[in-house]
Image (cartoon, rainbow, N blue to C red):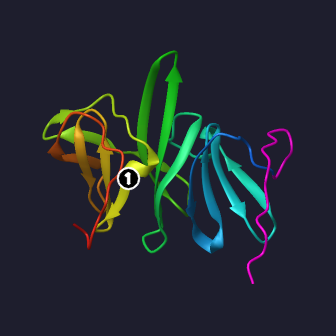
Amino acid sequence: YNPPAKRYAADPKLPGSLSNKNIENILPGPQGKLWIGTGDGLNIFDPETEEFEVLREKDLPGIKGPMIAPLYIDTVRQKAWLGSMIEKGTERWVYLYEMNLETRECRPIIFRDGSRQFDKIFFYGEQARPYKSGLLICDAEHGLFEVKENSLFADLVFPFKGIGWRMILNEDR
């Protein structure tokens, strides 16, 4: 039996509802909940209660930006990687954070190539994939980065210019 789909409309004024109609992505999270990245925060949907818990910049210590999207959730290691974006006019700044699932504390990930750090990174949620207990991220301007387990650095492993819209991993390759 497949129950019919149910539509949830965004109503930022109503507690427990979806906060924003602009959805970046949706990932399965701990306890059967869905983590939904939106233009104004992370919405965690509980299918049992049919309510949304909205987490914004003020609720996630260390994170910057109104747009928050989950990239990968590792329940074994009790951490998640979140992306955030700040827009000012035509400028966009995209950031990556490692979040402790228990404390909700977020620590920034620094993108680098050796000792050179990158100030401006641009990627979408679909351009990040779990890889060997860490994460691979395809940046539109610089190339492919790897965040290794227990590291706060995203190291450039394959440089290229131009955007890569889809990433396929096969057996951790």
Q: In which quarter of the image is the C terminus?
A: bottom left
Predominant SS of the magenta segment: loop
| Residue 10 rendering spot, x and y as whole percentages | 78, 44
Q: Is residue 47 above or below residue 144?
A: below
Kind of element beneath mark 1: strand
Residue drawn 13% across the image and 41% down it: 114
The image shows residue 100 at horizontal and vertical percentages of 49, 59
Q: Is 117 within the magenta?
A: no
Q: Which of 23 and 105 is in front in this view?
A: 23
Q: Residue furthest right?
A: 14
The residue where tag 1 is placed is 128
Residue lying furthest left in this view?
A: 114
Where in the figure is residue 122, as x and y percent of width and height?
A: 37, 35
Q: Report if residue 2 lies within the magenta region.
A: yes
Residue drawn at (74%, 68%) of the image: 47
Query: Percent position (x, y) of residue 8?
Result: 79, 53
Category of crowding for the residue at label 1, using alpha-carbon neighbours closer than 10 angstroms: few (below 14), some (14–19), many (at least 20): many
Is 13 on the left or on the right of 114, as rendered?
Answer: right
Q: Quadrant of the N terminus?
A: bottom right
Please name the amino acid that badge 1 sits on.
Ala
Seen in the picture, residue 116 relative to 38 is either above or below; the reply is: above
Left or right, residue 81 beside residue 69: left
**Seen in the image, is 45 located left or right of residue 114?**
right
- Which segment did they paint magenta? 1-16
